[in-house]
Amino acid sequence: MNWRHLFLPHPQTHQKAKLLHWHALVTYIVLFVFLQIGFSVINTYKPGVLGITSSISSQDVIKLTNVERQKDGLSTLAENSELSAAALAKAKDMFAENYWAHYSPSGKDPWSFMTAQGYRFTYAGENLAKNFYDSQSVVTAWMNSPSHRENMLNSHYQEIGVAVLDGVLNGQQTTLVVQMFGTPIQSVAAKPAVDSAAKQVAIVTRVPTPANVQPVVSNNLVAGTTVNYPNYLPLIDPYMINRILSIFIIMLISSLLVMDYVILKKRGVFRLSSHHFAHLSFLAVASSALLFSQVGSVL
């Protein structure tokens, strides 16, 4: 077969380029399916190989959070070492028990990590994020979620702690970001009950404040810890692979359709068939997937 027939319409029959035939579209779809199956197999037999390389820092997350609060006319949050230690303990626990949730499979809630570090509070909250590339994208994702935004712009909070931790979650190398908010009290508070009005995705809880108790603010921060896994192969970013492959196929099909139109127009051949709608539908679906896809997730 002449290789030109892969990219150009046939000179005699004017058939579309081979890469525009329906079986080529099926091949593209099968390629994506096998790619996802391959990622699943790698996660199972070589945990930690897949993942993303991020440049998130706890200090940047805190600074960007305070920037958003200032935009809304709110006071900035002070960094608190106990909250940061609690956030780090929560991140370690999620890797240890292999879960992605506010509550652990063993029944631990976010508040138990705070009280375990000696932090007693009148108000407290937690935001979670995973697999973002940088600090700004984490904060932006939280601000784009109404419940997480409500947590970040809660006027009751006075302090904040953030931990950033790398590890293997569900077989994939993952960067977890745990953000904890609080307003402290000096006396020991009872174990808090979650406010019935609170939302599951961005937890806010409240404990009555004892009379004549003033909150104590600490300016010490324990930075998020990064754990490296030297025995693993270099990370393969599945999101970026899918994105690059999608962009390549979109550009390929778009270029071939343009060449097909230009060449046939020069030959004086006009052709509009169901294959055009199939190609355009494929391009629309692939483009939408790229447009609305998001590498990270928040909870």
Image: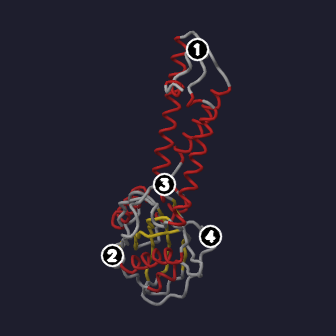
N-term mark: 1 or 4: 1
For marks 2 and 3, give the one nearer the viewer: 3
Q: Which of 16/190 is in front? A: 16
For marks 1 and 4, give the one nearer the viewer: 1
Q: Which of 102/283 is in front? A: 283
Q: Quadrant of the N terminus?
A: top right
Residue on which disc 4 sits: 197
Question: Compared to 250, does 118 lie above or below?
Answer: below
Cα distance between the residues tagged 1 and 4? 71 Å
N-term mark: 3 or 4: 4
Residue on which disc 3 sits: 238
Cα distance between the residues tagged 4 and 2? 31 Å
**SS at circle 2:** loop
Residue on which disc 1 sits: 12
**SS at circle 4:** loop
Residue on which disc 2 sits: 221
Q: Which of 276/135 is in front? A: 276
N-term mark: 2 or 1: 1
